[in-house]
Amino acid sequence: MRALPRTIPSSTELHDVRWLRSSYSTGANNCVETARPASGPWAGLLAVRDSKDPAGPALLFSPDSWAEFTAAIG
C-alpha cells in the first residue's frame, strides 16, 4: 500500500470539511485553521492550513501526532 502524502497542495481539495479557528484567534487573520475530513483518502486525519491563504496547502497529521504537538507547545 502506498503511503498518503502529508501535505495537500490546495486545501480546496478537501471537500465537505468545516474549517475551525481557535477562539483565542483575533480578527487579524493570522492563525491556523483545522479540519477533520470524514471521508476520502484523508478521513481520520487532521488538516491544518494558514488562515491567510485558505486555498493554499494543508498539512496532514494523525490524531496522535497532533495531540503530541499541541501538548508540547501548551
Image (cartoon, rainbow, N blue to C red):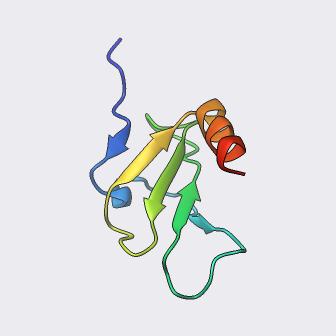
| Whether residue 55 is situated above or below residue 7 in the rendered picture | below
> Based on the displayed image, in which of its 4 quarters is residue 49 positioned?
bottom left
Measuring from the top left, give residue 27's x and y in whole percent: 58, 88
Residue placed furthest toward the front: 73
Pick the residue in front: 27 or 34: 27
Pick the residue in front: 26 or 60: 26
Residue at the (61%, 41%) spot, across then down: 69
Q: Is 64 on the left or on the right of 30, as rendered?
A: right
Residue placed furthest toward the bottom: 27
Measuring from the top left, give residue 65's x and y in whole percent: 59, 33
Residue placed furthest toward the left: 9
Q: Is 10 on the left or on the right of 17, as rendered?
A: left
Measuring from the top left, give residue 42's x and y in whole percent: 47, 37
Q: Is 60 on the left or on the right of 65, as rendered?
A: left
- Count the labels in the image: 0
| Whether residue 71 is situated above or below residue 29 in the rendered picture | above
Residue at the (30%, 57%) spot, across then down: 10
Measuring from the top left, give residue 13's x and y in whole percent: 35, 54
Pick the residue in front: 61 or 44: 61
Residue at the (44%, 56%) spot, across then down: 15
Q: Quadrant of the N terminus?
A: top left
| Whether residue 16 is situated above or below residue 39 in the rendered picture | below
Residue at the (65%, 31%) spot, across then down: 64
Q: Is 74 on the left or on the right of 40, as rendered?
A: right
